Image: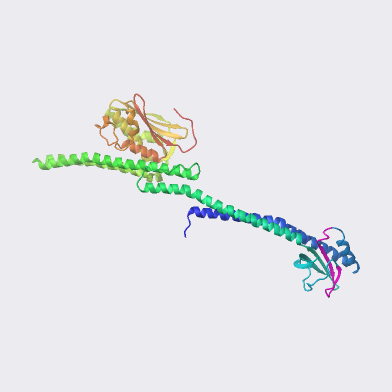
Amino acid sequence: MKLSIAARLAASYGLLVMGTVAGVAGVFYGATIGLLERSIDREIETISRRLVDQYRVTTPGSLPDALARELADGADSDEEILMLIAADGHVLSGNLLAWTLLDAPAGVLQSTWLKRRGQHTPVRFLLRDLGDGNRLLVGRDMREQQAMRELVLRALIVGALVTLGLVVGGTVYFRRQLERPIGAIRRAANEIESGDLGRRMPPLGDDEFGRLATDINRMLDRIEQLMNGVRHVSNSIAHDLRTPLTRIRSRLELALGEDGGAEEARGAMADAIAGIDDLIVLFNRLLQIAETESGVNARNFTLIDVNRIAEDMVELYDASAEEQGVVLNLSSRQGQTTLGDHNLIASALANLIDNAMKYAGSGARVEIAAHTCRDTVSLSVKDDGPGIPPEALPLVTQRFYRVDPSRSLPGNGLGLSIVEAIATLHGGRLELRNLYPGFEAELILPRRGLSVPCEP
Protein backbone atom coordinates (compact mmCIF):
# COMPACT_ATOMS: atom_id res chain seq x y z
CA MET A 1 0.00 0.00 0.00
CA LYS A 2 1.37 3.39 -0.98
CA LEU A 3 1.51 5.79 1.97
CA SER A 4 0.62 9.44 1.67
CA ILE A 5 3.27 12.08 2.27
CA ALA A 6 1.58 12.94 5.57
CA ALA A 7 1.82 9.32 6.69
CA ARG A 8 5.46 9.08 5.59
CA LEU A 9 6.39 12.28 7.40
CA ALA A 10 4.54 11.15 10.53
CA ALA A 11 6.25 7.75 10.44
CA SER A 12 9.63 9.43 9.93
CA TYR A 13 8.91 11.68 12.89
CA GLY A 14 8.02 8.66 15.05
CA LEU A 15 11.12 6.73 14.04
CA LEU A 16 13.30 9.77 14.68
CA VAL A 17 11.87 10.25 18.16
CA MET A 18 12.20 6.55 19.02
CA GLY A 19 15.76 6.48 17.72
CA THR A 20 16.61 9.57 19.75
CA VAL A 21 15.09 8.07 22.91
CA ALA A 22 16.94 4.79 22.34
CA GLY A 23 20.20 6.67 21.91
CA VAL A 24 19.63 8.71 25.08
CA ALA A 25 18.72 5.56 27.00
CA GLY A 26 21.88 3.83 25.78
CA VAL A 27 24.02 6.78 26.82
CA PHE A 28 22.32 6.90 30.23
CA TYR A 29 22.79 3.17 30.80
CA GLY A 30 26.43 3.31 29.78
CA ALA A 31 27.04 6.35 31.97
CA THR A 32 25.58 4.63 35.06
CA ILE A 33 25.68 0.83 35.06
CA GLY A 34 28.46 0.56 32.51
CA LEU A 35 30.63 3.08 34.34
CA LEU A 36 30.03 1.32 37.67
CA GLU A 37 30.91 -2.10 36.23
CA ARG A 38 34.09 -0.77 34.65
CA SER A 39 35.03 0.79 37.97
CA ILE A 40 34.54 -2.58 39.73
CA ASP A 41 36.68 -4.34 37.10
CA ARG A 42 39.50 -1.84 37.64
CA GLU A 43 39.27 -2.29 41.40
CA ILE A 44 39.46 -6.11 41.07
CA GLU A 45 42.49 -5.85 38.80
CA THR A 46 44.21 -3.37 41.14
CA ILE A 47 43.71 -5.52 44.25
CA SER A 48 44.77 -8.67 42.40
CA ARG A 49 47.93 -7.02 41.09
CA ARG A 50 48.86 -5.66 44.50
CA LEU A 51 48.41 -9.01 46.25
CA VAL A 52 50.37 -10.91 43.58
CA ASP A 53 53.22 -8.40 43.76
CA GLN A 54 53.22 -8.70 47.54
CA TYR A 55 53.28 -12.52 47.30
CA ARG A 56 56.29 -12.44 45.01
CA VAL A 57 58.41 -10.22 47.24
CA THR A 58 57.53 -11.90 50.56
CA THR A 59 57.38 -15.42 51.84
CA PRO A 60 54.58 -17.62 50.56
CA GLY A 61 53.11 -17.98 54.02
CA SER A 62 52.41 -14.29 54.29
CA LEU A 63 49.63 -14.25 51.62
CA PRO A 64 46.88 -15.67 53.90
CA ASP A 65 47.68 -12.92 56.41
CA ALA A 66 47.46 -10.33 53.60
CA LEU A 67 44.04 -11.70 52.57
CA ALA A 68 42.83 -11.52 56.15
CA ARG A 69 44.00 -7.91 56.46
CA GLU A 70 42.30 -7.02 53.14
CA LEU A 71 39.02 -8.50 54.32
CA ALA A 72 39.26 -6.82 57.70
CA ASP A 73 39.98 -3.28 56.50
CA GLY A 74 36.25 -2.41 56.50
CA ALA A 75 36.20 -1.29 52.84
CA ASP A 76 33.56 -3.27 50.89
CA SER A 77 34.09 -6.18 53.27
CA ASP A 78 30.59 -7.53 52.63
CA GLU A 79 31.11 -7.59 48.87
CA GLU A 80 34.79 -8.53 48.55
CA ILE A 81 35.67 -12.14 47.73
CA LEU A 82 39.29 -13.21 48.31
CA MET A 83 40.60 -16.78 48.12
CA LEU A 84 43.90 -18.63 48.01
CA ILE A 85 43.27 -21.91 46.16
CA ALA A 86 45.58 -24.89 46.06
CA ALA A 87 46.30 -26.81 42.87
CA ASP A 88 43.78 -29.52 43.86
CA GLY A 89 41.04 -26.95 44.42
CA HIS A 90 41.33 -26.89 48.17
CA VAL A 91 40.72 -23.41 49.68
CA LEU A 92 43.77 -22.47 51.70
CA SER A 93 42.51 -19.08 52.85
CA GLY A 94 39.71 -16.60 52.15
CA ASN A 95 36.04 -15.90 52.78
CA LEU A 96 34.58 -18.75 50.65
CA LEU A 97 34.53 -22.34 51.81
CA ALA A 98 34.86 -23.99 48.40
CA TRP A 99 35.67 -23.31 44.76
CA THR A 100 34.25 -25.54 42.04
CA LEU A 101 35.35 -23.78 38.83
CA LEU A 102 38.70 -25.53 38.66
CA ASP A 103 39.04 -25.11 34.87
CA ALA A 104 38.42 -21.34 34.86
CA PRO A 105 41.19 -19.57 32.90
CA ALA A 106 43.60 -17.33 34.74
CA GLY A 107 44.13 -13.65 33.97
CA VAL A 108 40.62 -13.09 32.49
CA LEU A 109 37.81 -11.19 34.20
CA GLN A 110 34.73 -13.41 34.30
CA SER A 111 31.22 -13.53 35.73
CA THR A 112 29.48 -16.50 37.36
CA TRP A 113 26.90 -17.44 39.98
CA LEU A 114 28.03 -18.80 43.36
CA LYS A 115 26.26 -19.93 46.46
CA ARG A 116 27.25 -17.41 49.13
CA ARG A 117 25.62 -17.04 52.52
CA GLY A 118 22.88 -19.42 51.45
CA GLN A 119 22.00 -17.48 48.29
CA HIS A 120 22.90 -17.78 44.62
CA THR A 121 24.92 -14.65 44.05
CA PRO A 122 26.29 -13.07 40.88
CA VAL A 123 30.04 -12.72 41.15
CA ARG A 124 32.68 -10.96 39.09
CA PHE A 125 36.15 -12.49 39.59
CA LEU A 126 39.72 -12.72 38.37
CA LEU A 127 42.06 -15.72 38.87
CA ARG A 128 45.84 -15.32 39.05
CA ASP A 129 48.48 -18.13 38.85
CA LEU A 130 51.07 -17.68 41.60
CA GLY A 131 53.69 -19.94 39.93
CA ASP A 132 53.76 -22.62 42.63
CA GLY A 133 50.50 -24.32 41.64
CA ASN A 134 48.41 -22.11 43.86
CA ARG A 135 45.90 -19.58 42.55
CA LEU A 136 44.67 -16.26 43.87
CA LEU A 137 41.01 -15.34 43.34
CA VAL A 138 39.89 -11.74 43.71
CA GLY A 139 36.17 -11.16 43.19
CA ARG A 140 33.19 -8.97 43.95
CA ASP A 141 29.67 -9.78 45.04
CA MET A 142 27.47 -8.13 42.34
CA ARG A 143 24.06 -8.36 44.02
CA GLU A 144 23.77 -4.60 44.57
CA GLN A 145 24.93 -3.89 41.03
CA GLN A 146 22.50 -6.50 39.71
CA ALA A 147 19.64 -4.88 41.62
CA MET A 148 20.68 -1.46 40.34
CA ARG A 149 20.88 -2.77 36.76
CA GLU A 150 17.39 -4.28 37.01
CA LEU A 151 16.04 -1.02 38.47
CA VAL A 152 17.56 1.04 35.68
CA LEU A 153 16.33 -1.40 33.01
CA ARG A 154 12.80 -1.33 34.44
CA ALA A 155 12.88 2.46 34.46
CA LEU A 156 14.11 2.53 30.87
CA ILE A 157 11.46 0.03 29.79
CA VAL A 158 8.70 2.06 31.45
CA GLY A 159 10.12 5.22 29.91
CA ALA A 160 10.28 3.54 26.52
CA LEU A 161 6.64 2.44 26.78
CA VAL A 162 5.54 5.91 27.81
CA THR A 163 7.61 7.40 25.01
CA LEU A 164 6.13 4.93 22.53
CA GLY A 165 2.64 5.96 23.57
CA LEU A 166 3.54 9.63 23.22
CA VAL A 167 5.17 8.96 19.86
CA VAL A 168 2.10 7.10 18.56
CA GLY A 169 -0.19 9.87 19.80
CA GLY A 170 2.12 12.57 18.47
CA THR A 171 2.42 10.79 15.13
CA VAL A 172 -1.36 10.60 14.75
CA TYR A 173 -1.69 14.25 15.75
CA PHE A 174 1.15 15.24 13.44
CA ARG A 175 -0.44 13.38 10.56
CA ARG A 176 -3.81 15.02 11.15
CA GLN A 177 -2.18 18.43 11.36
CA LEU A 178 -0.58 17.80 7.96
CA GLU A 179 -3.66 16.28 6.36
CA ARG A 180 -6.02 19.06 7.47
CA PRO A 181 -4.50 21.89 5.36
CA ILE A 182 -3.63 19.49 2.54
CA GLY A 183 -7.21 18.23 2.53
CA ALA A 184 -8.54 21.80 2.45
CA ILE A 185 -6.28 22.60 -0.51
CA ARG A 186 -7.34 19.43 -2.33
CA ARG A 187 -11.04 20.10 -1.78
CA ALA A 188 -10.67 23.63 -3.09
CA ALA A 189 -8.67 22.32 -6.07
CA ASN A 190 -11.42 19.78 -6.86
CA GLU A 191 -14.06 22.51 -6.79
CA ILE A 192 -11.93 24.70 -9.05
CA GLU A 193 -11.41 21.74 -11.39
CA SER A 194 -15.18 21.32 -11.53
CA GLY A 195 -15.48 24.81 -12.98
CA ASP A 196 -15.78 27.11 -9.96
CA LEU A 197 -13.02 29.55 -10.93
CA GLY A 198 -14.10 31.94 -8.18
CA ARG A 199 -13.22 29.40 -5.48
CA ARG A 200 -10.21 30.22 -3.34
CA MET A 201 -8.10 28.44 -0.77
CA PRO A 202 -9.28 28.95 2.82
CA PRO A 203 -7.06 30.91 5.23
CA LEU A 204 -4.62 28.44 6.81
CA GLY A 205 -2.64 30.68 9.15
CA ASP A 206 0.80 32.18 8.80
CA ASP A 207 2.82 28.99 8.38
CA GLU A 208 4.12 27.32 5.22
CA PHE A 209 0.65 26.03 4.30
CA GLY A 210 -0.84 29.47 4.82
CA ARG A 211 1.78 31.04 2.56
CA LEU A 212 1.21 28.27 0.01
CA ALA A 213 -2.54 28.97 0.08
CA THR A 214 -1.83 32.68 -0.41
CA ASP A 215 0.44 31.94 -3.38
CA ILE A 216 -2.17 29.61 -4.89
CA ASN A 217 -4.90 32.23 -4.44
CA ARG A 218 -2.67 34.81 -6.10
CA MET A 219 -2.10 32.37 -8.97
CA LEU A 220 -5.86 31.71 -9.22
CA ASP A 221 -6.55 35.46 -9.29
CA ARG A 222 -4.09 35.77 -12.16
CA ILE A 223 -5.61 32.78 -13.98
CA GLU A 224 -9.12 34.20 -13.55
CA GLN A 225 -7.88 37.55 -14.79
CA LEU A 226 -6.32 35.87 -17.83
CA MET A 227 -9.47 33.84 -18.47
CA ASN A 228 -11.57 36.99 -18.29
CA GLY A 229 -9.05 38.61 -20.59
CA VAL A 230 -9.33 35.72 -23.03
CA ARG A 231 -13.13 36.00 -23.01
CA HIS A 232 -12.88 39.75 -23.47
CA VAL A 233 -10.36 39.33 -26.29
CA SER A 234 -12.53 36.70 -27.97
CA ASN A 235 -15.56 38.97 -27.83
CA SER A 236 -13.52 41.96 -28.95
CA ILE A 237 -11.91 40.04 -31.81
CA ALA A 238 -15.31 38.82 -32.96
CA HIS A 239 -16.61 42.40 -32.87
CA ASP A 240 -13.53 44.08 -34.36
CA LEU A 241 -13.05 41.50 -37.09
CA ARG A 242 -16.68 41.45 -38.14
CA THR A 243 -16.69 45.11 -39.22
CA PRO A 244 -13.57 45.06 -41.48
CA LEU A 245 -14.44 41.63 -42.87
CA THR A 246 -17.98 42.77 -43.63
CA ARG A 247 -16.57 45.91 -45.25
CA ILE A 248 -14.12 43.89 -47.38
CA ARG A 249 -16.83 41.42 -48.39
CA SER A 250 -19.28 44.19 -49.28
CA ARG A 251 -16.67 46.04 -51.34
CA LEU A 252 -15.73 42.88 -53.24
CA GLU A 253 -19.36 41.90 -53.71
CA LEU A 254 -20.19 45.39 -54.99
CA ALA A 255 -17.26 45.30 -57.41
CA LEU A 256 -18.32 41.84 -58.59
CA GLY A 257 -21.87 43.03 -59.25
CA GLU A 258 -20.88 46.18 -61.06
CA ASP A 259 -20.31 46.30 -64.78
CA GLY A 260 -17.31 48.54 -64.33
CA GLY A 261 -13.98 47.91 -65.86
CA ALA A 262 -10.58 47.04 -64.58
CA GLU A 263 -10.22 50.36 -62.74
CA GLU A 264 -13.13 49.58 -60.41
CA ALA A 265 -11.83 46.03 -59.85
CA ARG A 266 -8.37 47.36 -58.95
CA GLY A 267 -9.92 49.85 -56.53
CA ALA A 268 -11.91 47.07 -54.86
CA MET A 269 -8.84 44.89 -54.59
CA ALA A 270 -6.79 47.77 -53.15
CA ASP A 271 -9.44 48.40 -50.50
CA ALA A 272 -9.54 44.67 -49.70
CA ILE A 273 -5.75 44.51 -49.40
CA ALA A 274 -5.73 47.56 -47.09
CA GLY A 275 -8.40 45.97 -44.92
CA ILE A 276 -6.51 42.67 -44.81
CA ASP A 277 -3.29 44.55 -43.90
CA ASP A 278 -5.13 46.13 -40.97
CA LEU A 279 -6.19 42.66 -39.83
CA ILE A 280 -2.63 41.37 -40.15
CA VAL A 281 -1.42 44.28 -38.00
CA LEU A 282 -4.12 43.41 -35.47
CA PHE A 283 -3.07 39.75 -35.30
CA ASN A 284 0.63 40.66 -35.14
CA ARG A 285 -0.08 42.84 -32.14
CA LEU A 286 -2.03 40.05 -30.44
CA LEU A 287 0.83 37.64 -31.12
CA GLN A 288 3.29 40.16 -29.67
CA ILE A 289 1.23 40.38 -26.47
CA ALA A 290 1.00 36.57 -26.26
CA GLU A 291 4.77 36.13 -26.77
CA THR A 292 5.55 38.82 -24.22
CA GLU A 293 3.22 37.38 -21.57
CA SER A 294 4.65 33.89 -22.12
CA GLY A 295 8.11 35.11 -21.10
CA VAL A 296 9.84 33.70 -24.19
CA ASN A 297 11.74 36.95 -24.76
CA ALA A 298 13.19 36.89 -21.22
CA ARG A 299 15.93 34.62 -22.56
CA ASN A 300 17.21 37.53 -24.69
CA PHE A 301 17.74 39.95 -21.79
CA THR A 302 20.99 41.94 -21.90
CA LEU A 303 22.18 45.23 -20.44
CA ILE A 304 20.45 48.04 -22.31
CA ASP A 305 20.89 51.82 -22.31
CA VAL A 306 17.49 53.50 -21.94
CA ASN A 307 19.00 56.86 -22.93
CA ARG A 308 19.98 55.42 -26.30
CA ILE A 309 16.50 53.94 -26.78
CA ALA A 310 14.89 57.31 -26.03
CA GLU A 311 17.20 59.08 -28.48
CA ASP A 312 16.53 56.51 -31.23
CA MET A 313 12.74 56.74 -30.82
CA VAL A 314 12.76 60.54 -30.88
CA GLU A 315 14.85 60.44 -34.04
CA LEU A 316 12.52 57.84 -35.55
CA TYR A 317 9.32 59.84 -34.89
CA ASP A 318 10.76 63.29 -35.53
CA ALA A 319 9.68 63.47 -39.15
CA SER A 320 6.22 62.07 -38.42
CA ALA A 321 5.75 64.53 -35.55
CA GLU A 322 6.71 67.45 -37.78
CA GLU A 323 4.25 66.27 -40.42
CA GLN A 324 1.43 66.13 -37.82
CA GLY A 325 2.34 69.49 -36.34
CA VAL A 326 3.53 68.02 -33.04
CA VAL A 327 6.63 69.25 -31.21
CA LEU A 328 8.63 66.18 -30.12
CA ASN A 329 11.43 66.77 -27.64
CA LEU A 330 13.83 64.65 -25.57
CA SER A 331 13.86 66.56 -22.28
CA SER A 332 16.01 64.28 -20.08
CA ARG A 333 18.80 61.74 -20.62
CA GLN A 334 19.30 60.70 -16.98
CA GLY A 335 18.56 56.99 -17.34
CA GLN A 336 20.87 54.21 -16.12
CA THR A 337 21.40 50.78 -17.65
CA THR A 338 19.01 47.93 -16.91
CA LEU A 339 18.58 44.32 -17.91
CA GLY A 340 16.01 43.69 -20.62
CA ASP A 341 15.16 43.17 -24.26
CA HIS A 342 16.20 46.20 -26.31
CA ASN A 343 13.63 45.66 -29.05
CA LEU A 344 10.72 45.20 -26.61
CA ILE A 345 11.58 48.33 -24.62
CA ALA A 346 11.92 50.28 -27.86
CA SER A 347 8.55 48.90 -29.03
CA ALA A 348 6.92 49.93 -25.75
CA LEU A 349 8.28 53.48 -25.99
CA ALA A 350 7.22 53.67 -29.63
CA ASN A 351 3.64 52.76 -28.64
CA LEU A 352 3.60 55.47 -25.97
CA ILE A 353 4.94 58.10 -28.39
CA ASP A 354 2.46 57.03 -31.06
CA ASN A 355 -0.45 57.32 -28.60
CA ALA A 356 0.70 60.75 -27.39
CA MET A 357 1.01 62.16 -30.92
CA LYS A 358 -2.30 60.63 -32.00
CA TYR A 359 -4.49 61.70 -29.08
CA ALA A 360 -2.83 64.99 -28.09
CA GLY A 361 -3.52 66.29 -31.59
CA SER A 362 -1.92 68.79 -33.89
CA GLY A 363 -0.05 71.62 -32.19
CA ALA A 364 0.62 69.57 -29.07
CA ARG A 365 3.97 69.25 -27.35
CA VAL A 366 5.30 65.75 -26.50
CA GLU A 367 8.28 65.33 -24.17
CA ILE A 368 10.31 62.13 -23.82
CA ALA A 369 12.41 61.65 -20.68
CA ALA A 370 14.69 58.98 -19.21
CA HIS A 371 15.09 59.08 -15.43
CA THR A 372 16.82 57.14 -12.64
CA CYS A 373 15.32 57.00 -9.16
CA ARG A 374 16.90 54.80 -6.45
CA ASP A 375 16.57 51.25 -7.78
CA THR A 376 14.46 51.95 -10.89
CA VAL A 377 14.86 53.51 -14.31
CA SER A 378 11.97 54.94 -16.27
CA LEU A 379 11.00 56.16 -19.70
CA SER A 380 8.16 58.67 -19.70
CA VAL A 381 6.10 60.28 -22.45
CA LYS A 382 4.31 63.50 -21.49
CA ASP A 383 1.94 65.58 -23.63
CA ASP A 384 -0.24 68.67 -23.13
CA GLY A 385 -3.32 67.15 -24.73
CA PRO A 386 -6.79 66.56 -23.24
CA GLY A 387 -5.77 63.48 -21.25
CA ILE A 388 -8.05 60.54 -20.42
CA PRO A 389 -11.31 60.65 -18.45
CA PRO A 390 -10.55 59.50 -14.86
CA GLU A 391 -13.15 56.73 -14.97
CA ALA A 392 -11.48 55.27 -18.09
CA LEU A 393 -7.93 55.40 -16.70
CA PRO A 394 -7.99 51.87 -15.10
CA LEU A 395 -9.47 50.38 -18.29
CA VAL A 396 -7.23 51.69 -21.04
CA THR A 397 -4.69 48.85 -20.67
CA GLN A 398 -7.36 46.25 -21.42
CA ARG A 399 -7.12 44.77 -24.88
CA PHE A 400 -9.28 46.47 -27.51
CA TYR A 401 -10.54 49.07 -25.02
CA ARG A 402 -10.86 52.51 -26.56
CA VAL A 403 -12.15 55.71 -25.01
CA ASP A 404 -15.28 56.85 -26.84
CA PRO A 405 -13.80 60.08 -28.32
CA SER A 406 -10.90 58.07 -29.79
CA ARG A 407 -12.98 55.52 -31.66
CA SER A 408 -12.97 57.73 -34.75
CA LEU A 409 -9.15 57.64 -34.82
CA PRO A 410 -7.19 54.80 -36.39
CA GLY A 411 -6.09 52.07 -34.02
CA ASN A 412 -7.25 48.87 -32.37
CA GLY A 413 -6.88 49.48 -28.64
CA LEU A 414 -3.85 47.20 -28.17
CA GLY A 415 -1.00 49.68 -27.76
CA LEU A 416 -1.13 50.11 -23.97
CA SER A 417 -1.85 46.39 -23.52
CA ILE A 418 1.44 45.66 -25.27
CA VAL A 419 3.31 48.21 -23.13
CA GLU A 420 1.90 46.76 -19.91
CA ALA A 421 2.80 43.21 -20.97
CA ILE A 422 6.38 44.33 -21.74
CA ALA A 423 6.63 46.08 -18.36
CA THR A 424 5.39 42.96 -16.54
CA LEU A 425 7.87 40.76 -18.41
CA HIS A 426 10.72 43.00 -17.19
CA GLY A 427 9.47 43.00 -13.60
CA GLY A 428 8.33 46.63 -13.94
CA ARG A 429 5.05 48.48 -14.30
CA LEU A 430 3.23 51.03 -16.44
CA GLU A 431 1.91 54.13 -14.68
CA LEU A 432 -0.64 56.42 -16.31
CA ARG A 433 -1.61 59.81 -14.90
CA ASN A 434 -3.53 62.91 -15.95
CA LEU A 435 -1.63 66.18 -15.53
CA TYR A 436 -4.51 68.66 -15.97
CA PRO A 437 -3.75 69.65 -18.61
CA GLY A 438 -1.95 66.89 -20.36
CA PHE A 439 -1.21 63.23 -19.82
CA GLU A 440 1.85 61.21 -18.84
CA ALA A 441 2.64 57.52 -19.42
CA GLU A 442 5.68 56.18 -17.56
CA LEU A 443 7.34 52.81 -18.11
CA ILE A 444 9.18 51.96 -14.85
CA LEU A 445 11.77 49.17 -14.84
CA PRO A 446 14.02 47.74 -12.12
CA ARG A 447 17.61 48.95 -12.31
CA ARG A 448 20.44 46.43 -12.11
CA GLY A 449 23.06 47.90 -9.82
CA LEU A 450 23.41 50.00 -6.66
CA SER A 451 20.63 52.37 -5.66
CA VAL A 452 21.18 56.00 -6.56
CA PRO A 453 19.32 59.15 -5.47
CA CYS A 454 16.36 60.28 -7.55
CA GLU A 455 17.42 62.63 -10.32
CA PRO A 456 15.15 65.46 -11.41
**Span colored in magenta:** 75-93
User: Is 363 rendered above or below residue 283?
Assistant: above
Question: x and y percent of residue 314 in the render?
Answer: 34, 32
49 lies left or right of 59:
left
User: Is 362 rendered above or below residue 236?
Assistant: above
- Residue 423 lies in what quarter of the image? top left
Q: Residue furthest top?
A: 437
Question: x and y percent of residue 99 in the render?
Answer: 81, 71
Question: x and y percent of residue 25 in the render?
Answer: 65, 55
400 lies left or right of 172:
left
- Residue 340 lies in what quarter of the image? top left
The quarter in which the C terminus is drawn is: top left
User: Is 280 rendered above or below residue 395?
Assistant: below
Can residue 281 be seen here?
no
Question: x and y percent of residue 220 in the render?
Answer: 39, 43
Residue occupying the point 91% across, 69% down: 61
Q: Is residue 50 magenta?
A: no
What colour-coding does the image apply?
rainbow
Can residue 344 be seen here?
yes
- Residue 238 lies in what quarter of the image? top left
Could you say which is closer to the camera, residue 8 or residue 48?
8
Residue occupying the point 90% across, 65% down: 65
